[in-house]
Image (tube, helix red, strand yellow):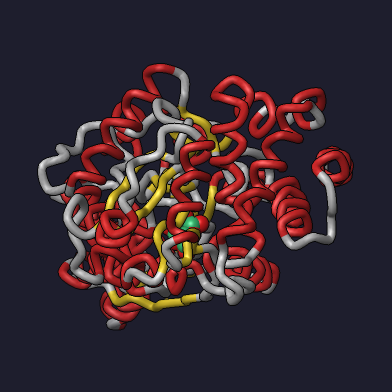
Amino acid sequence: MTVRTKLIAGVALAAASLGLASLGLAGAAQAQTKEVQMLHWWTSGGEAAALSVLKKDLAAEGYAWKDVPVAGGGGDAAMTALKAMVANGNNPTASQMLGYTVLDYAAAGKMGDLTELAKSEGWDKVVPAPLQKFAVSDGKWVAVPVNVHSVNWLWINKAVMDKIGGTEPKTFDDFIALLDKAKAAGVTPLALGGQDWQEATMFDSVVLSTGGPEFYKKAMNDLDEASLKSDTMKKAFDNLAKLKAYVDPNFSGRDWNLTTAMVIKGDALVQVMGDWAKGEFKAASKTPGTDYICMRFPGTDGSVVYNSDMFGMFAVPDDRKEAQVALAKATLSKSFQSSFNVVKGSVPARTDVPDTDFDACGKKGIADLKKANDGGTLFGSLAQGYGAPPAIATAYKDVVDKFFNGQIKTSDEAVAQLVKAIDEAK
Ligand code: GAL
């Protein structure tokens, strides 16, 4: 008996023991359990294609999908919507969430408990330990990781690269030289969307490249004050300032996927973005190596700055639990972890999924993750909810945005503001 049929049997049994079956109410109760209400911010072409893999899997099992999309990369708008829903006692079955946000809701007693399913499925043996830190709270599984993304990537248009005679940059200085080459050839060098989370996601990579792995961990995960106000951090801000010279005049406020489209179409050379960008290349039928190049942000080879989309499983009434369990089970199934992540651009959140169906970038992503996890160079992205709790991530994004847009003028002032903002957010 599968968990689902067991559960259906369980529902029928409970209904029978209450004498409801004879009144025909068992059927009604069952119908209500057959819907998954999911809040998420997956509204771009690549994201929607990935999500439909899940919708299809659940439909095949007989579950309806009630979509609650809240557009806005990085999820800030979605998290505002979630807060309102939960405050009104209107918990979704599940919501896309990033690491520390899950822990916040768990601490507030808002999450459900998937531990029984986790045990029968053996999740603790296959989900990488750094993810379990965020999916398990107080010994209970409260969320299910859908994927592992990483942010320290470059996405380069191959034809443009060939046209300008560029080579893959190994260091930050090489990167600047490459951007100069594109500029001289009259191509927009750096595709960037000027939204705080996009700038900060790029800055995660700049910090790692500037300071190295040890420094990244101390500053961006341990929030060590000496590191945050160090000369190395100032240098990271100075490096960020250099990148400003290479964006196009319309960068302000542009969505990340429209920005990826600039690279896909050859209107720009390169985007620094998490590997959800690859989902857009895939949706546009582009092939790595032929149409585009994926490589680690220069100077960050060997390290992986990750985030993982979790489906936070909310406390729901008993009649909605069956659908929640079905969703959780489908999400962490081996086959789904392959088929979904192939489309999404991310890599599986289980260690036992073969890389067979993944393209060259996906294969590299899987190998890099394993190496970084084994070697202690896997770090949480501060911009993407895995470096520190949400209030601190927000403070970080705000300072980076103000610096990038000139409201904070020097790197001295930037580090001072950063330390202050983080302190206040603690
Ligand atoms: C990230 C999320 C990705 C992708 C991206 C842009 O926060 O982890 O899955 O959706 O935002 O929307």
Label count reads 0
Residue 311 shows in the view: no
Work out whether residue 207 or residue 425 is closer to the camera in this orientation and state it.
207
Position of residue 55 measured from the top left corner of the image (x, y, whole percent): 27, 70
Position of residue 20 measured from the top left corner of the image (x, y, whole percent): 34, 74
**Residue ranking furthest to the left:** 356
Residue 415 shows in the view: yes
Q: Where 99 sits versus 327, above or below? A: above
**Residue ranking furthest to the top:** 375
- Picture quarter containing residue 158? bottom left
- Picture quarter containing residue 67? bottom left
Residue 291 is left or right of residue 370, and the answer is left
- Picture quarter containing residue 162? bottom left
Work out whether residue 334 or residue 211 is closer to the camera in this orientation and state it.
211
Work out whether residue 326 or residue 145 is closer to the camera in this orientation and state it.
145
**Residue ranking furthest to the front:** 184
Work out whether residue 215 or residue 112 is closer to the camera in this orientation and state it.
215
Position of residue 142 measured from the top left corner of the image (x, y, whole percent): 49, 46
Q: Residue at x 24, y 63 (%)?
A: 282
Q: Residue at x 58, y 69 (%)?
A: 78
Q: Residue at x 48, y 41 (%)?
A: 135
Residue 272 is left or right of residue 285, and the answer is right
Q: Where 330 sits versus 129, above or below? A: below
Q: Residue at x 43, y 66 (%)?
A: 187
Image quarter in which the C terminus is found = top right
Position of residue 207 measured from the top left corner of the image (x, y, whole percent): 61, 36
